[in-house]
Image (cartoon, coloured by chain):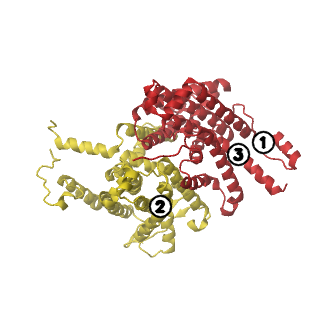
Chain colours: A red, B yellow
Amino acid sequence: MPEQLLFAMEVILNGLMAGVLYSLVALGFVLIFKASGIFNYAQGVMALFAALTLVGIMEGQVPFSHLINAVFGTNIHEFGWQVPAVLAIILTIAVMVLLAIAVERFVLKHLVNQPEIILFMATIGLAFILEGFGDLMWGSEIKILDVGLPQGVSDIVETTTFGWFGYGFFIDKLDMVAAVIAVLLVILLTIFFKYTKQGRALRAVADDHQAALSVGISLRFIWVLVWSIAGIVALVAGMMWGAKSGVQFSLSLIALKALPVLILGGFTSIPGAIIGGLIIGVGEKLFEFSIGPLIGGATENWFAYVLALLFLVFRPQGLFGEKIIERV
Amino acid sequence: MIYREAGDFSASYKEDSQTFPIRFDRIAFYAFVVVAFLVVPFFINDYWANAVLLPFLIYAIAALGLNILTGYTGLVSLGSGGFMAVGAFASYKLMTSFPDVNFAVHILLAGFITAGVGVLFGLPSLRIKGFYLAVATLAAQFFLVWLFNKVGWFFNYSPTGIINAPPRTSFGFEVTGPAASVSVKYVFCLSFVVVLALIARNLTRGSVGRKWMAIRDMDIAAEIIGVNPLTAKLSAFAVSSFFIGISGALFFSVYLGAVEVADTFSIQKSFLLLFMVIIGGLGSIFGSFAGAAFLVLFPVLMKNVLTGWWGWPTDLATHVEVMSVGLLIVVFLIMEPHGMARLWQIAKEKLRLWPFPH
């Protein structure tokens, strides 16, 4: 096979892997949107917050140490212990559930029946709160997250593909792990939605709030549940992105990248989120590889949005979204 | 006791439909304008101008523009930072290409150029709305910033990519550049604010504004009663971008003087403007000013209190500030979705009845 084609194939594969990571964030959006009709802008910051908390717990940092030191003039930073990764993950999940309860209790409860756009803006506010809170709690310096995920280029893939084509593909091990985890997560969520009592209740709420209420489903419980699940998905996404590029503020910007993914896939479809993520991942890598050098590079910043914009004009509800019907 | 409308009769339709129907409001407004134009410029100092007054005036223009789009027409835009960048770069190109022309003309032209770009990016709004449109405007934000960062023609091929405002004059006064006095800058911006606010006020209460509001309240119903969504939505985009473009041009040339596009006109700027409009009050001219004033003053205040009085490190103060802004947004959306403009209205109602509210 010609070199150029193989190189393009490698770019596509890497794009697919990057797309999986976008899908992971988009998944959290879809979950909340399905259950409560809220477009949760804070999803990206939730991923950042989860990753910060995970690192903080693992390293044994004292929460709010900066604040405490500034107010009381003390000089404490760490408890001086290391928490094993598994325990830290469980504790972080607990924190995310607490966060879900707090969000329901203090924000959502008061905004029932408001127009969608107001709820959207409330989640933008929430994103700022979480961002400030996370930084205040754990400090804003770039942290390294190491939960024992494999890193670096996979030798096996490289040698195998070299044996096949005489050209070794460079693929990050972490990306492969992320892909596997994303698939597992989707299967788990699908099983949860299809076969459990809570999953059925969730689908009922997604269909019709009032009808769900009238058959005795507690909306507030469902909201806490779905925000907790979104929090866990955020944790997974935060772990992957954090392990890839360090835990820092730019992590929360992947939420913005997830938006075009959602537009392509449709806001209400879990498979749509995955496929949308893959399309965006491959599309932006291919575009950067083929057209990017001609027009100055760094096209990844905007390609996804422009693709989404063009796509919207032809199919406003996304690939798998429900048809939008408007009535006066 | 003072704030009364008793004895304030309107004898003609014209009198009834004036901008400030209550005499007290009218007098207060004129007094305010006179003080702003004739007193403040003589007492203004560098700190107040650069930390508070100039950013307030410039953001107020942008907030007015965004309010026309988001508050009056109901089209949420996250691309305002990008449009501000268009205004800034348009004014830069004009300033460097035609150095002898009155600088105010450049600012206006920059506004018109931005209006054109705004209409272009507003085209999708004819098909999509809500979050979908918000995402579409994100495309404008990221694409425009990338464009101004990568294409050398826009920044005259300067090696750093930073644009610097050369000294330019308007009506014989030097407005831009390091030698311009803050009083001149202040009056220059203030004139734009006053004129644009009057335009915005009169547009929004005329037929154009009613069409916008009809589209906001329910676009299909508006279409049925004969509002043309094409012209209504695109005119909203055009007017809004005109305002935001002027604000961007002033922000770059008069206020900052040098701009690195990826820093200054990032997505954060878009959010800041959106917050001004939400906190100030969606669909209110006064609200745009209140929101701009609040979000300019609030960080200054926080910084002074936290780092100045309590001696906290600056990074900590920044975190607290970010958190408080978010908190304020949520609190406002829950307690008073119509923002500070509604609070002001309630205060005025109370004042009218005071001291005998029953």
What amino acid is labelled 3 in the image? Leu
* Frontmost residue, B274 versus B211: B211
Of the image marks 3 and 1, the number of the one nearer the N terminus: 3
Categorize mark 1 by other alpha carbons within 10 Å: few (<14), some (14-19), many (20+).
some
Disc number lying in front (3 or 1): 3
- The residue at which mark 3 appears reads as A16
Name the one closer to the observer, A153 or A193. Answer: A193
Q: Which chain carries label 3?
A: A
**Same chain? Circles 3 and 2:** no
The residue sitting at 31% across, 51% down in the picture is B286
Rendered-image quadrant of the N terminus of chain B: top left
Residue B308 appears in the rendering: no
Asked whether residue A100 appears in the rendered view, the answer is yes
The disc label shown at residue B118, or none: 2
The answer to which quarter of the image holds residue A243 is top right
Image location of residue B36, percent across then percent down = 29, 58
Residue under label 1, please give it: A153
- Please tell me whether mark 2 sits on a helix, a strand or a loop: helix
Report the amino acid beneath label 2. Answer: Gly
